[in-house]
Amino acid sequence: MKKLLVPTDFSDNAFLAAQYAAELCRKHKYSLHIIHFYTASSSAFADNELTEETEHTGVLKADITIKAWAERLKQQYPTVLISFHNERGLLDEALAKEASRDGYAAIVMGTTGATADKNIFWGSNTALVTTKSPIPVIAIPNRPFAVDVQKVGLLTNFNQEELLTLQEFAHTFKETFDLSLIHVFKESESASSIHDRLDSWSFNVEEFSAVRHIEKLVAPVVKDDKDLDTIPEVVAQLIEENHIDMILVSKSRKTFIERLFTGSVSKAIALDLQKPAFFGKTI
């Protein structure tokens, strides 16, 4: 039985991602493994939390917390096989190593950590994980989402590795879906040439039995419109207007998607990841 790997910092946001993973496990017969990475300072009990048992047996705070966290999840999903362990180390360094062990299908993680009002998705952990992970990463924004995915958006620049990401997604979610091919071009480019190229490239996608229907979403960057004068803004609008359930991001597009949702880009400061995203594995 393949497993989904869920890293946690024990925040409510991480639990939302774990619930999503558990739903996916229940639907597609995966098991679920929860992992928490700790440092010496993060694993220690505060003085007012110490008991005689924890003080003299070497039990870590994380040991107690992860067990309670897993039990809470098991109560909600009694048919899902759930395991867990703690490990000393830093998430962005150690998670890829754990993911490389045999048996994991994908990582499922949240887009924000314990500080709910601070979007750390592109500032730190999740972004680093997507660039290092040897298996796909499913990033879940900070709210509940259904695991039934009807419409998927693939960011495309006509690269073969995008087909690999699509294949990984179909293998992980094990269901049919409608596919939107998303491409944004510069005003200086020929729209008819772009459409012809996308028509030609889409023949590759038609080979996928999981794809029910293909639509092409092509739009230019509009320099005279302050709301649509960057590629990230155009893509965000296409995703929202076309009711896409999940975004697929291949390795070559990770830098682009980082610019799409990062708060450090002034034009995109109000943008945030609003839909789950599936990141292809790093080869």
Image (tube, rainbow, N blue to C red):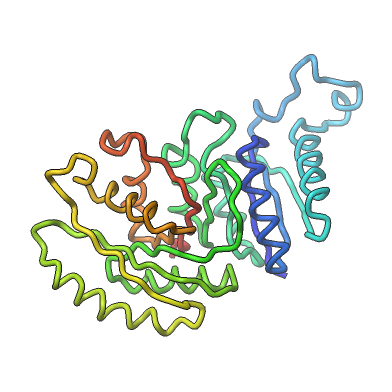
Percent position of residue 158, x then y: 28, 71
Dividing the picture into quarters, in which one does residue 220 lie?
Answer: bottom left
Task: Describe residue 62's horizontal placement relative to residue 190 as left or right.
Answer: right
Percent position of residue 45, x then y: 75, 23
| Residue ID at (35%, 71%) | 215
> 36 above or below 106?
above
> 135 above or below 52?
below
Task: Describe residue 52's horizontal placement relative to residue 224 as left or right.
Answer: right
Percent position of residue 277, x then y: 47, 55
For the C terminus, the image quarter is: bottom left
The residue most toward the top is 48
57, 222: nearer the viewer: 222
243, 205: nearer the viewer: 243
56, 212: nearer the viewer: 212
Dividing the picture into quarters, in which one does residue 153 lie?
Answer: bottom left
| Residue ID at (63%, 63%) | 104
For the N terminus, the image quarter is: bottom right
Percent position of residue 83, x then y: 77, 53
